[in-house]
Image (cartoon, helix red, strand yellow):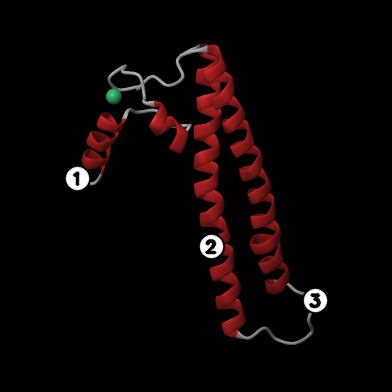
Amino acid sequence: MKKERLEYYKMILTDLKNSILEDLDSIEDQHIHHSSAKEYGDSAYPIHLADIADSLTEAELGFKLKNSEEIILAAIDAALKRIEEGTYGICQDCGARISDERLEVMPYAVRCITCKSVYEKNKTK
Ligand SMILES: [Zn+2]
């Protein structure tokens, strides 16, 4: 892959990483911190069960969101590492070059579109 192309993907990946890091911060603020403040809040009144259920759902949602963002974050870091190592854009299963169309959509892709569909098929078995 050409150096300019690599620089371009590196920029996209870094941007993406920063926006996810910002998202993670706001998810924590909005869901996790907020809901635990609600659960152990300073209110002298007993907390209604419905409120607890609500805040649990919020916390769980926050956790799930956070989890999937963290998976993407790990994939981005791995992609940045591959750029450094010079293996970026190469399918980890068959060694073929991953198309630019695919990398534009998913710059942290580790498989070409063919291997991805095989992988997805095996995964759901
Ligand atoms: Zn492949």
Mark 3 or 2: in front is 2
Residue drawn where x is 68% and y is 55% of the image: 26
Residue drawn where x is 64% and y is 50% of the image: 23
Residue drawn where x is 53% and y is 63% of the image: 60
Q: Gap in Å between the C-alphas at discs 1 and 3?
A: 49 Å
Q: Earlier in the sequence, mark 1 or mark 3?
A: 3
In the rendered view, would you say 73 is above or below 95?
below
Residue drawn where x is 24% and y is 46% of the image: 124
Amino acid at circle 1:
Lys
Mark 1 and mark 2 in contact? Answer it, CB < 8 Å: no
> Which of the four quarters of the rendered structure image does ligand 1 lie in?
top left
Q: Which mark is residue 125?
A: 1
The percent position of residue 111, horizontal first and vertical second, equals: 35, 28
Classify mark 2: residues with Cα within 10 Å, few (<14), some (14-19) or many (20+): some
**Residue 106 seen from this side:** no
Q: Which corner quadrant holds the C terminus?
A: top left
Pick out the residue farthest to the left: 125
| Residue on which the image places disc 3 | 42
The percent position of residue 81, horizontal first and vertical second, equals: 54, 20
| Residue on which the image places disc 2 | 61
Amino acid at circle 2:
Leu
Amino acid at circle 3:
Asp
Q: Tell me if 41 is positioned left or right of 100 in this view.
A: right
